[in-house]
Amino acid sequence: MKVLEDITPFKLITLLVTVAGAVSAASVAATWQFCQKTQSDELQGYKAAQELHLKDAISSLSSYAEAAKLTSDERARLTALDRQLPALMKANTDMKTRLDEVTRDRDSLKVTVSSMLQKNTEIEVPVGEAHWIVPNLVTIGVTSVDRSYIEATFNGAPHLLDVGGQLPFDLAGKRYTVTLTKIEPSGATFVVTLPVAG
């Protein structure tokens, strides 16, 4: 171990400083290269993010996420509507059924009225009475008679009519006319005229 005996304290310190310097230089060089590589990777990532407009995309996604959130009130209303849906669908079906029934009744009434008024109809009404022209729909009554006019009621409304005076009414999409044709001391005679085909 002659080598160790030749080492003086000054040589030992010089040797240690040299080794420490070499290790420090190697550490600094390695750290420098590591930092350059890391910084280069970060710079490339930043450039790629700029090209992809990631900041805008992230902000857009955030706003879409906010817009998609339902408030508790909105959720409660949606839940209530979900619970009401079966009842509303049933009510809709019931209304359609009722509409079909009313349409059939209307069509049946049109046929009935048309068959009743197929020809001009003459109606004699005594003073103090009213008669149905169309059952439960149209009435004509005679309140009093004079030689040249009568006081009549048509569907409850008072009218003064001379011979030839007319009262129109609409029924089943057609316009009919009631005409005073004769005055007698005991009453009056009316003719219900069919609509003129046009």
Image (cartoon, helix red, strand yellow):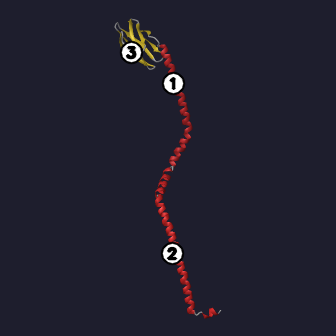
Where disc 2 sits, the SS reads: helix
Q: Is residue 97 positioned above or below 159 on the image? A: below
Q: Is any atom of residue 166 visible in this view?
A: yes
Q: Residue at x 55, y 42 (%)?
A: 82
Quarter of the picture holding the C terminus: top left
Residue receiving disc 1 = 103
Location of mark 2 (residue): 32
Element marked by disc 1: helix
Q: Earlier in the sequence, mark 2 or mark 3?
A: 2
Q: Which residue type carries mark 1? A: Thr
In the rendered structure, the answer to whether residue 195 lies left or right of residue 7 reads left
Q: Residue at x 48, y 50 (%)?
A: 67
The residue most toward the right is: 1
Q: Would you place residue 46 above or below residue 127 in this image? A: below
Amino acid at dot 2: Trp
Q: Position of residue 49 (x, y in %)?
A: 48, 61
Q: Three-letter amino acid code at disc 3? A: Leu
Q: Could you tell me which secondary element the residue under label 3 belongs to? A: strand
